Image: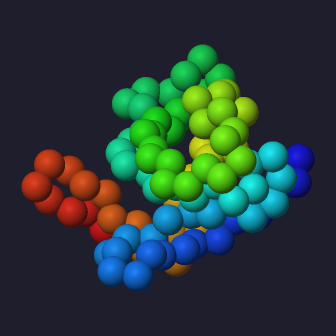
């Protein structure tokens, strides 16, 4: 499976970045993640599932943003982003009112 090509974009005046998919079936969709968390326990396959919610800000091709294919696509992007941030020591975990680096 080829990596999904995406870029970070930001609207003037916003304090947050969005992700824009730049190729493939979901090309030009722009979205942000809202809540991201790991499941408390491993699943039957020994993996720790990642759960997230998202907001779509731009969907110029009117693709089905509720489809499993779309959710899997942005889930794969999320895993890549988290792995890169962990590698660069840039992830902050929220634990109630405390941030854990």
Q: Is residue 96 left or right of residue 64?
A: left
The relative height of residue 65 versus residue 87 in the rendered view (above or below) is: above
Q: At 10% across and 55% down in the image, what residue appears?
A: 97
Closer to the camera in the image, 98 or 58: 58
Q: Is residue 12 left or right of residue 86?
A: left
Point out the residue furthest to the bottom here: 12
Point out the residue furthest to the left here: 97
Q: Quadrant of the C terminus?
A: bottom left
- List x then y, in percent, for residue 35: 36, 45
- List x then y, in percent, for residue 11: 45, 75
Total numbered badges shown on the rendered structure: 0
Q: Please say whether residue 80 is visible from this viewpoint.
A: no
- List x then y, in percent, for residue 43: 55, 22
The relative height of residue 99 versus residue 57 in the rendered view (above or below) is: below
Q: At 14% across and 59% down in the image, what residue appears?
A: 98
- The colour style of the image is rainbow
Q: At 51% across and 27% down in the image, what residue appears?
A: 42
Q: Choose top left, top right, bottom left or bottom right for residue 7.
A: bottom right
- List x then y, in percent, for residue 50: 50, 38
Q: Is residue 5 left or right of residue 60?
A: right
The relative height of residue 59 versus residue 16 in the rendered view (above or below) is: above
Q: At 75% across and 56% down in the image, what residue appears?
A: 27
């Amino acid at each position: 499976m080829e990596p999904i090509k995406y870029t970070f974009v930001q609207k003037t005046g916003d304090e947050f970045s969005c992700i824009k998919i730049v190729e493939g079936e979901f090309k030009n969709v722009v979205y942000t993640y809202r809540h991201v968390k790991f499941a408390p326990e491993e699943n039957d396959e020994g993996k720790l599932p990642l759960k997230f919610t998202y907001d779509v800000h731009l969907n110029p091709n009117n693709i089905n943003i509720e489809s499993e294919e779309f959710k899997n696509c942005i889930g794969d992007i999320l895993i890549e982003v988290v792995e890169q941030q962990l590698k660069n020591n840039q992830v902050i975990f929220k634990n109630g009112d405390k941030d854990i680096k």
